[in-house]
Image (tube, helix red, strand yellow):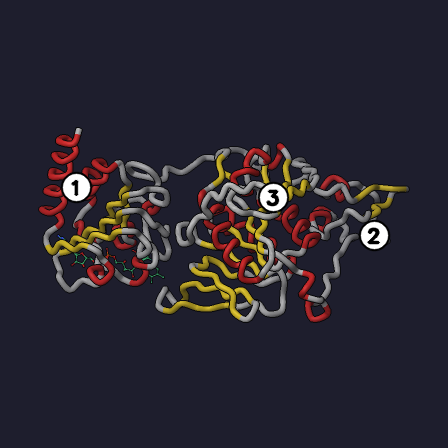
Amino acid sequence: MEKCTGCGLCEKACPFGAIKIVDKIAVIGDECTLCGACIDQCNLDAISIQRKKFIDVDLSQYQNVWIVVEIKDGKVRNVSFELLGKALELADELKQDPCTLLIGSNVKRFIQDFSNRGAKKIYIAEHEALKDYHTETYSSIITGIISKYKPNIVLYPATISGRDLAPRVAATLELGLTADCTSLSIQNGLLLQTRPAFGGNIMADIICPITRPQMATVRPNVMEMASIKGNDNAEIIDIPVKVDLQNLKIKTKEIINAPTSVCGPPVCEADIIVSGGRGVGCKENFKFLEDLANVFKGAVGASRAAVDLGWIPKSQQVGQSGTTVSPKIYIACGISGTIQHLVGMKSSDVIIAINKDPNAPIFDVANYGIVGDLKTVVPLLTEALRKRLQNNN
Ligand SMILES: Cc1cc2nc3c(=O)[nH]c(=O)nc-3n(C[C@H](O)[C@H](O)[C@H](O)COP(=O)(O)OP(=O)(O)OC[C@H]3O[C@@H](n4cnc5c(N)ncnc54)[C@H](O)[C@@H]3O)c2cc1C
């Protein structure tokens, strides 16, 4: 602290109100959670944190399975309930508690959504300045909360903000992090984190035996959502936080949502997806797929080949480097069925493939297959469905 001039930047930056300037020097109080927000602000390197090496740490003090909830446009994203579904399973196996961290503005209204789905403890970090996701504020608050409450496992959504947040928390706390997991289980008391590797050709199993918490981001639409159970007795832990937007290094001026779907709902949320690949032949032919999707009020998806050819926006891409989907019906038109595409859609309830090659690998995963030219088959299907719906009305 010899370098401290009492400038007060650290006092403003501390989200937990743990720093006071006394006699022109920063004094760090017991409320300090070691989140590190003050270090980022101090221009004089007057503050440092010496984190304990995990070799000297009793790992048994890290308990419970946490999820970090994502709230967007004032709504809880479904992936949060999927994370809770997995957390319930992992916690049950470890005989620990499934816990939820709600961070944002006006988030207490979501408590019941998690307590009646089985969360045992709900941690709340609420502040009006946390309305929208911000790297610095969210990561320093979550880092501090993790340091204080010591969870065993923390799961984040592998969404745009989750992919930004989790590595930052992991780097500050000097932890491992497995990104984009498609499966999680417990093996010998450790979190076994499975994700595609080497271009999706193998599934890699990863463990973090010496650091805690064990942390992973999980792809939306790959885990089952926690169902409503009706029990509503979660313990609520309110964590007071303060946010100083003035001194943030990154300022959010405006949030512009990119268009997510060419027609219908976003692919990640659609119940029915009509997807096209290279076999569609050209941009104009995607109209056949749109017509079919419109009958169902579904979305149009695509393989990476169709996206790379510029026939459809990247937001519609399904697969390893696109979106993972699990709709009720997935109709793959002119898609061969490479592993990178299959990992993104194979958990769909019903898969229908339309392909002119009877040996296309997509037929190996399809429940129903039509061998034929999609330019003939898709319009016939659309027409037949339209008639059926008209007769039913
Ligand atoms: C690291 C990495 C990540 C990747 N990520 C993804 C990803 O997220 N999503 C993804 O999709 N791919 C991804 N890929 C690419 C993937 O390997 C394939 O190249 C791609 O999926 C192939 O797309 P496709 O099936 O549309 O094209 P093709 O493999 O060329 O298949 C076209 C199919 O259309 C059929 N066909 C042709 N004409 C017609 C017709 N008139 N009627 C009916 N059928 C017809 C053909 O028989 C063929 O089966 C990735 C690759 C790598 C290396």
Residue that badge 2 annotates = 3
Give x and y (percent) for residue 207: 53, 68
Residue 142 relative to residue 178: left or right: right
Residue 374 relative to residue 112: left or right: left
**Mark 2 residue type:** Lys
Residue at the top extreme, as displayed: 393
Between the C-alphas of marks 2 and 1, the distance is 69 Å
Give x and y (percent) for residue 357: 13, 60
Residue nearest the viewer, comparing 339 with 328: 328
Q: Earlier in the sequence, mark 3 or mark 2?
A: 2
Q: Earlier in the sequence, mark 2 or mark 1?
A: 2
Residue that badge 1 annotates = 288
**Residue under the point 46% across and 68% down:** 205
**Residue under the point 31% across and 44% down:** 313
Residue depth check, mark 3 versus mark 2: number of the one nearer the observer: 3
Ligand 1: which quarter?
bottom left
Element at label 2: loop
Residue at the right extreme, as displayed: 23
**Mark 3 residue type:** Ala
Residue that badge 3 annotates = 234
**Mark 1 residue type:** Phe
